[in-house]
Amino acid sequence: MGTGVQSYISYRVITKTNLPEFEGAEKIVIRRYSDFEWLHDRLAEKYKGIFIPPLPEKNAVEKFRFSKEFIELRRQALDLFINRLASHPELKQSEDLRTFLQADEEKMDRARSYETGIFKKPGDFIQMFKSKVSDVVLGKEKPVEESTPEYEKLKHYIFELENHLAEAQKQAFRLVKRHRELGQSLVDFGKAIKLLGACEGDSLEKVFSEVGSKSEMLSIKLQREADNLLFNFEEPLKDYVRAVQSIKATMLDRANAFRQHFDLDQERKYKELNLEKMKFMNPEKFTESETEFSELKAASEEATKRYEHIVSVMNEELARFQEQKTADIGLAFHEFAKGQAKLAKDIADAWRSVLPKLEACSSS
């Protein structure tokens, strides 16, 4: 859509459902990448503890931004994002998801115009930045962190998983590149061997021409397998690298909730001791302090509930994540092995078919 630097990609999103809360059995809307971002951020803000499915990367090298391959990879990733939301027991009930899937462009623009970020105004960010800088400058103690053996084991696993997935994805990308390079080399070799045969003439021309044709045919198969590796092997691995980032974002929410719970609980205990002393030492201020303590206690209990809710939801999400990861990664490696086995057979069959003619030439 659009022209020049203002051009962008739009996506047609088709929803089919029998859920009564939707406006009919089928709906088609047009969405931009920024609309998907809006939906992701809204869900991340509202559903603490849930691993919000990841989006594909926003930035792309300008010259590749409108390439057929890039567009299809992004479309595939966005399709996966939406279907994961639609199959999640809680996220599929989100009002924001229904808005995204059903609203016309005017309603969608109106929904996006509301402030949805963590920072409601620029000053909030400045204040937070100042606080962080002050903590460093003043040498304040590092905030207390949740540290149970079970949670430490989980954190170690997540960071290890991220590293190993990233390395596997990196090597998968190299495999794609090698297949394409070998495919191009076979094209060049095929052309060269045909010219060599034409130069020789007689029986060699026919045999070399067939060898060249086999090389060109195999180059096509290698390019197809490179595409298969990219879409069905490397991209699923990259998707799970992004998924681990989502888990880490949820762990950050958990850490923030734990610190708030801990700080308020400590303050509550301290105020409770002071209140007991004040009851006898300063009865005039006791009533006022008792009211403040009640408010603090309520805030502390609410913070504890938020933290415990995130922990509970995270445990459910981890079980769901592990089950889905096993299925998805297993399928990716199955596609990899199946593609490699077929390619190896095609290569062996192609070269085996020209062996008798080459043997006849070498013995004559």
Image (cartoon, rainbow, N blue to C red):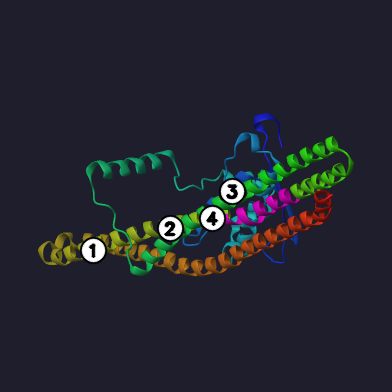
Amino acid type at image mark 2: Phe
203 versus 87 height, above or below? above
Packing grade of label 2 (10 A; few <14, some 14-19, many >=20) is some
Amino acid type at image mark 1: Glu
Residue, disc 2: 159
Magenta-colored span: 221-237
- Disc number for residue 168: 4
Q: Residue furthest right?
A: 202
| Label 2: element kind | helix
Amino acid type at image mark 4: Ala
Residue, disc 3: 174
Residue 221 lies left or right of residue 160; in this view the side is right
Visible residue check, residue 44: no
CB atoms at circles 4 and 3 under 8 Å apart? no
Mark 2 vs mark 4: in front: 4
Mark 3 or mark 2: name the one nearer the start of the chain.
Answer: 2
